[in-house]
Amino acid sequence: MTGGSRIKTSNPPCPRCKTGYMHKDGFTDGAGRKQRWTCRPGGGNREICYSTTRPDLPVRGHNMQPVKNVIPVYRRQLEPVERYIVTAAQNATPIHEQFWASLKVAARELKVELLVIPLRYKNPTSRWTQSQANEEVWASGLRPYLWNQRKNLNRNLVLLADIKTQPTASEPLRGYEGISHGESGILGHTKLQMRVIPTPQNKFPKILTTTGAVTVPNYTDSRAGKLGEFHHTLGAVLVEIQGKIFHLRHLNASKSTGEFTDLNRVYAPHGSRKAERAHALVMGDTHTDFIDPDVAAATFGEGGMIETLNPTHLVYHDLLDAYSVNPHHAGNPFAGLAKHRQNLRDVQAEISRAVQFVVKHLGKDRKAVIVSSNHDDMVQRYMLTQDWRDDPANAVFYLKTAVMIAEAMRIGKHGMEMPSAFRHWFTQLAADSMDRIRLLGDNESFTLAGVELGMHGDRGPSGARGSARNLRRIGVKSIIGHSHSPCIEEGCYQTGTSTPLRLEYNSGPSAWLNTHCVLHADGKRQLINIIEGEWRLAN
């Protein structure tokens, strides 16, 4: 800025332009005359380059470049650990004492670094502060744990603690898909949301997630404030580092007790205990003939999820791949030749392999639930669209199934009722185990702990194509499959896939991930990712 020579005065020099001195001026804002500090460069120039009610907090002034950021830096020397717990805290708001105590119990027992990302939100109707003029204030117990700098937790995961998103944001991850480049990212926010970003096939899976908060709800009495309060989650993210691999799980606490479950342990304010049996393990789409051996081992093998969590129910999505009668192979004689060479053309044999897979993993006191899914329904599609005379390998199967359908067809109170070919043959082949296997029909509900488990995810509201986004606000919590890309969208949790992350039909950048979802005994849901055959850090 130009403006003549500097005038010597007893007033403090302007910290921005270095050519003028600070003066106290008066101004009228309609509510009375107040004081502010302004800079008048030498020579009597009245042009203001610096103006604020506090001279130690500079702001952008007329014809000036932005001044240096004066946001306090919260960081500390971190111990070399393999685990981190990351949560967020809103300014001028009390912590949830029980949840905070439970987090510290987990931090002590798991030997983790506990990091709290500070968030800002001005709430003139706050019950705890009459004024938030000094917004850089957080509950005193959090101060040693605050962290607001960007940090790489390993080569594939970055903590985006320097980003502040409004706690009332309905989609806090929107717009941040590329901000962490190729690495996964953790963003501090009071709402729990998670998405997987498509990446090229040679890249590590990219996950973006928010954290949940350790502070109690504190929002304005407005539409945005009420929505923010409704979606406010007492939660955190547990990160386990294993070289270039990371394991990421959400910790979702009870609002009344502050307790939370991680895998097979419950962490409470005064200690931890073994968790009760999980209600269910909802597995990523199975596609039995194409299940990844590493995923199968992490799920069903020694030390795997089922042995650790001991769920009462195993929930299968897309149990059948239906590769033998895949409609996308119609008209491709070379696909038929390849399937013939690999003995993959027999649809009854494929159903039999799926039945054997389910029965094998039932255990002594566990039940299986088969969700009606689009790949299972490909058998029905085959019956309606193909001619048995063109498919000698399945001619007998087709004719037997056609007789069954013809004899059972009828018109009911809802219109035409057609029996399911897949259901019929599964029931026949698993006759000795059907007392512990439940095959869900179309639109059949199955709930545990108030969570709907009977939707595959291919069908949305009012006839629309299904997705987590249009199933997130149907009024009930749910766990779905179908897309092979896990996510958390408000009330809807979506699993991934149990297959390799590349199959013949997902070319280009992909968001597929091997992810299951456990429904804990307390009714909370937790996504568990399998990364390069590992699903957690070995103790």
Image (tube, rainbow, N blue to C red):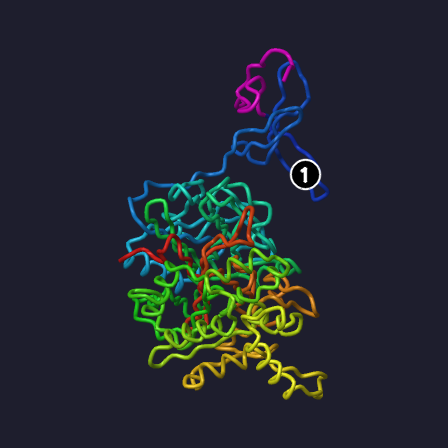
| Residue 499 x, y percent position in the rendering | 46, 59
Residue that carries the numbered disc 1 in the rendered image: 33
Residue at horizontal 56%, vertical 74%? 372
Q: Is residue 125 left or right of residue 284?
A: right
Which of these two is toward me, 4 or 440?
A: 440
- On screen, residue 363 above or below 128: below
Which of these two is toward me, 239 or 206?
A: 206
Quadrant of the image containing the N terminus: top right
Amino acid type at circle 1 is Arg
Q: Is residue 495 left or right of residue 52?
A: left
- Verify whether residue 120 appears in magenta: no
Residue at horizontal 61%, vertical 66%? 458
Quadrant of the image containing the C terminus: bottom left
Which of these two is toward me, 66 or 373?
A: 373
Residue at horizontal 35%, vertical 41%? 76
Q: Is residue 141 left or right of residue 109?
A: right
- Verify whether residue 21 appears in magenta: yes
Dot 1: what SS? Answer: strand
| Residue 139 x, y percent position in the rendering | 43, 53
Which of these two is toward me, 353 or 19?
A: 353
Badge 1, how many Cα within 10 Å: few under 14, some, many 20+?
Answer: few
In the image, the segment drawn in magenta is 1-22
Tell me the chief SS of the magenta region.
Answer: loop
Q: Quadrant of residue 365?
A: bottom left
Q: Is residue 262 left or right of residue 164?
A: left
